[in-house]
Structures are given as C-alpha cells and as structure tokens.
Image (cartoon, helix red, strand yellow):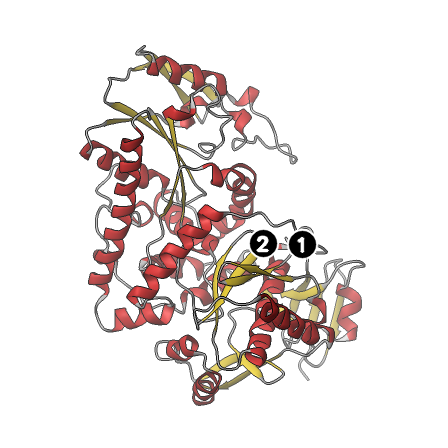
C-alpha cells in the first residue's frame, strides 16, 4: 500500500497508509489551538478545506480565523450562507452582491425595490437558523451538464452564463441544504463557526457585516463612507446601462469581437471623469496645489499626467513636485515594530519644509527643491529651483496627500484633494465579487515584473505590508477628499491576464506564496483575454504593462 508522510508545524511526522482528511481526529489534535477557530489547512502551501482528502506526503499548517487567509474563508463562507438563506426567503428574486464598504459587503435584490427592515430581519434569522444547526457544507464535482441544469433551476443567471466561456468537463460546486452554488476558494466544512456577523439596512439593500481578521471575535463599529458609496453606485449604474456587470458579460463582448468599442467607451468615461475634476478645480478659483493620494497601483502617476493635460486645456500650467524629494533622511526616519525603517509614516517626510516651500511659492518666491538619494538615504540639493506664475498650479501625489497634517499651514481654499482607487464594478457572477485589492495586486505583479525585475512571489510576499500602510495612512483620510476618481477600467483584467498568468504559474508549492498565486490563477481563469495592442497609449493600464505615451 502507498504510504504518505505528514509533517506538522512542530516538526513532528506521522506516516499513514491511507488518505486522510484534515478534520479527522488524528489531525485535529495536532492542528487545533486553544481559543482559535480552525477554518482550513495549508497542504504544501495550498489552502485547502478541512474536508479535502490528503493522499500525498505533505507539510501541514493550520489556517485560523485570525489570519488573512482564514478571514477570507470566513467571509466567503458567510456569503454562501447568506445566498442559501436568500434562496429560501426570496425564492423568486436574485440576490446580488455589490462592493465592499468597511468590513462589510453591500447586497441588493434584482427587483430594484428597497428591502424593508422586517425582510432583512427575516433573512438574518434564516442565516442564524442555518448557523446554529451547524449544517455541513458539501464540496463535490459534478458534470458540466448537471451544473448548467442546477444553475438554471436556481435562477443563477450570471453563473450559468459564465459556463458558456469556462467549460471544463466537471465543475466543483458547494451545497448547503438544498442550495448549490459555485465559489472560487475553499469554504468552512460546517456553518457553526460563522457566528460573528450582522445584517444592517443600508440604502436600497443591506450590508453583510463581518469581523476584521485580527479581531475575529467581534464586529467593528460601522464607519460610513458616503462618498465612496456614491462612486461605486455611479459605476454600478453605468455597468447596468451597458449590460456589462459580470465576467460573463465581458467575456460575451470579447467573444463577439466588440472589445475595441467597449475599450473606447470605458476610456472615454474615465477621461470625462478626470475632465470633470479639472473643471471643479477651475471653478473653485483659489486652488494653487492639487494633492493626489491613493493605494498602491491605483494609477496615481498616470492620473497626475492626465489631469495635468485637462488643467492645461483650461489655461493652467501644471508643475509637479514629488513628495519623495522631502524624505528627512535615514538617520531621522522612524522605525516600525520590526525595527525596519518606516518610509510610509508621515514623520518620514520633512513636513515643515513642505509647508514653508508651498507658502513661499504661493507668495511668489523662488524655492530650491530638494532631492533624495534612496541608495545613500540622504537628502541633497542640486540647484533645482521653482516659482509659480499666476496661472501655474502645483500637482503633488503621494500616500499622505489627503492627510491635512501634511499641509497644515496651507489654507484650505488653496488645496484640492483627490482620492484614487481601482473600484471595479464587475462581479464574477451574482454572488462572487471581485475584490478591489485583487485588481490592484494583479496590476502590481505585472508592473513589478515588467519594470522592477520582481517575481510574482516577491510581490505577493510584500503585499500584506503594503496593505497595512494603506490602512494606516490612506484609507482613514479618504473622506477628506474633494473628489474621488475610479481608476479601474472594466476591460483591464483580460489584458493583465496575458502578463500575470505565466508569472503566477512560476510560483511553486515550495514557496509560501503558492496558495495566493493559485487563488489568483483561479480568479483569472474566469476571463477571456484581450491583447495589449488593443490598449490605447494614454491608458492607465500602460503604466503597468508598458508602452505608454507618457514618460515616467
């Protein structure tokens, strides 16, 4: 008989003759940790559900609810329970997942009617029934024909449509009681662990609220973000008007060879939005500096250049100052909790010099702009001077642009703050959303490989640190923005897939990033491809794939 060897986190090994599942008692004793919920297991760095069969020698590692991976499984499973409950409570309506808002996802029904409070309470009670019963979530493979029949019977329109473009002979599905759906990642093995959640009425629908990963035992206070919600809603409504709301809809366009027309439409919309922001700046009349901030790979550099063109069309002469020039120097840079230099904190910048330079410029004085040597970690001056004529306007982009502490001495009427993010309005199907962070991570993987010589594993490895900086220094200030711009383009994932797919396939099971690479590959597998030649030279996408008309 075939023997397999399992290696546990403490280094101990166990030799077995037959296959085993992680939720077997022999493994649970080795993997469980007091006070934590075991939601899944790493098998040779691949995230697997607890009912997955292990039939090869493997290094095992538990995935708890207080980890990033565990939180994703918790949320995904909670969404499945919600979909099953909605199927029971609203059998004649489709539940539609929207965007994220804080620690929650926004949902509506396809009826377009505002959900009543008592309907939301009824839905929550049905979820509680399923969770308290600790119902088993079954994962199995079914034939393509049976999958089509299931999704047609259940009214899962977008999921069924996607099978026209993603058609393997067998399809993995999840079943809870009488409800069957398709999810792109492992789920918990039973519902009893999903006991921290809430449904909260919000606008026409409701929010499914869940805990943050490092505090899984409680919900955070709700932090409303009305400006961000309006941006999302505007783009969702736009997608509905064009009948492009899902991966299947986009794949249909590519199949019908209408992608060039769709690319023109999406690029024109984004250009119009940038033009509208330029008009807002002009109409205010007192603005002397535009501050642009956004998370990693949101397209800040290209947006700055496109905004500069729109401002020139209105009679301005934009000038750019990079905040990178104002680092204080390595010897004065604070360190983080791990003892590393924290270049993302506000204190890493010479805030006093920034303010005095700006005020001097506004007073008609000439300033000498500093430079920074990243290799030496020192600031120096190389004789670069600047002054502002009456029709000149400054454009500055950096992670602290929305934080008023950066420009505390500058009068509010002289500042215009813009928040950028890649907020795709597309879903994979009715119940599977596309996380904004996934869109940006794929952009970053492609750009790092194209221009910085980094592997996909390198980029994935540092992504948690990048997101931590965003949570600390960008997201808390997004509501301070005078304008928000969505830099996502709904055709970009099929373009990025051409570059990202081979990069992600180079991540091996010997690397810890293998699980995340596999997840991203499964995500990209839902999209047909668009060649880079279809991307306009002024597009934000060119910032990541190369060939831009702009110089960086």
Please provide percent x and percent y for residue 270.
28, 49
Please provide percent x and percent y for residue 388.
28, 17
The numbered disc on residue 80 is: none
- Residue 71 placement: quadrant: bottom right
Relative horizontal placement of residue 463, taking residue 220 as reference (left or right): left
Viewer-side residue, 417 vs 151: 417
Vertically, is 472 above or below 216? above
* Residue receiving disc 1: 219
Taking the spot 68% from the left edge, 59% from the top edge, the residue there is 65
Relative horizontal placement of residue 78, taking residue 487 as reference (left or right): right
* Residue receiving disc 2: 103
Quarter holding the C terminus is: top left
Label located before the other in sequence (2 or 1): 2
Q: CA distance from mark 2 to mark 1?
A: 8 Å
Q: Are marks 2 and 1 in contact (CB under 8 Å)?
A: yes
Viewer-side residue, 52 vs 211: 211
């Amino acid at each position: 008989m075939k023997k397999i060897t399992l290696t546990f986190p403490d280094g101990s090994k166990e030799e077995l003759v037959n296959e085993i599942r992680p939720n077997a008692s022999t493994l649970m004793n080795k993997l469980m940790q007091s006070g934590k919920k075991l939601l899944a297991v790493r098998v040779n760095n691949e995230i697997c559900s607890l009912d997955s069969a292990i039939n090869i020698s493997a290094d095992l590692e538990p995935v708890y609810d207080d980890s990033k991976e565990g939180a994703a499984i918790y949320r995904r499973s909670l969404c499945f329970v919600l979909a099953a409950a909605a199927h029971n409570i609203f059998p004649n309506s489709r539940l539609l997942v929207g965007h994220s808002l804080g620690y929650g996802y926004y949902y509506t029904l396809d009826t377009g009617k505002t959900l009543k409070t008592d309907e939301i309470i009824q839905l929550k009670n049905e979820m509680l029934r399923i969770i308290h019963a600790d119902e088993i979530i079954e994962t199995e493979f079914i034939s393509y024909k049976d999958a089509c029949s299931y999704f047609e019977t259940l009214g899962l329109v977008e999921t069924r449509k996607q099978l026209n473009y993603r058609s393997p002979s067998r399809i993995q599905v999840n079943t809870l009681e009488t409800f069957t759906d398709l999810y792109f990642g492992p789920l918990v093995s039973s519902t009893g662990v999903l006991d921290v959640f809430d449904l909260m009425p919000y606008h026409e629908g409701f929010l499914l609220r869940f805990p943050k990963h490092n505090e899984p035992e409680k919900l955070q206070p709700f932090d409303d973000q009305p400006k961000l919600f309006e941006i999302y809603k505007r783009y969702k409504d736009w997608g509905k008007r064009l009948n492009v709301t899902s991966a299947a809809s986009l794949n249909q366009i590519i199949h019908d060879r209408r992608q060039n027309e769709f690319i023109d439409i999406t690029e024109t919309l984004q250009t119009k939005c940038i033009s509208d922001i330029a008009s807002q700046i002009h109409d205010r009349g007192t603005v002397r500096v535009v501050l642009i901030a956004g998370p990693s790979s949101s397209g800040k550099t290209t947006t700055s250049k496109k905004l500069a063109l729109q401002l020139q069309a209105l009679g301005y002469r934009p000038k750019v100052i990079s905040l990178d020039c104002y680092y204080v120097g390595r010897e004065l840079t604070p360190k983080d909790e791990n003892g590393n230099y924290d270049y993302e904190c506000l204190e890493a910048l010479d805030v006093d010099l920034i303010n005095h330079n700006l005020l001097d410029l506004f007073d008609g004085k000439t300033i000498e702009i500093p430079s920074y040597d990243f290799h030496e970690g020192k600031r120096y001056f190389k004789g670069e001077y600047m002054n502002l004529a009456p029709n000149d306007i400054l454009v500055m982009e950096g992670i602290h642009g929305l934080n008023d502490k950066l420009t505390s001495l500058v009068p509010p009427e002289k500042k215009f703050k813009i928040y950028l993010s890649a907020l795709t309005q597309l879903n994979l199907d009715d119940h599977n959303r596309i996380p904004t962070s996934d869109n940006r991570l794929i952009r970053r993987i492609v750009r790092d490989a194209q221009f910085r010589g980094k592997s996909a594993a390198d980029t994935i490895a540092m992504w948690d640190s990048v997101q931590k900086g965003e949570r600390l220094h960008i997201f808390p200030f997004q509501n301070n923005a005078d304008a928000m711009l969505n830099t996502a383009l709904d055709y970009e994932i099929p373009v990025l897939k051409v570059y990202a797919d081979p990069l992600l396939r180079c991540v091996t099971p010997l690397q810890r990033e293998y699980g995340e690479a596999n997840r991203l590959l499964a995500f990209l597998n839902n999209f047909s491809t668009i060649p880079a030649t279809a991307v306009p030279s002024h597009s934000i996408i060119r910032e990541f794939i190369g060939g831009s008309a702009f110089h960086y």
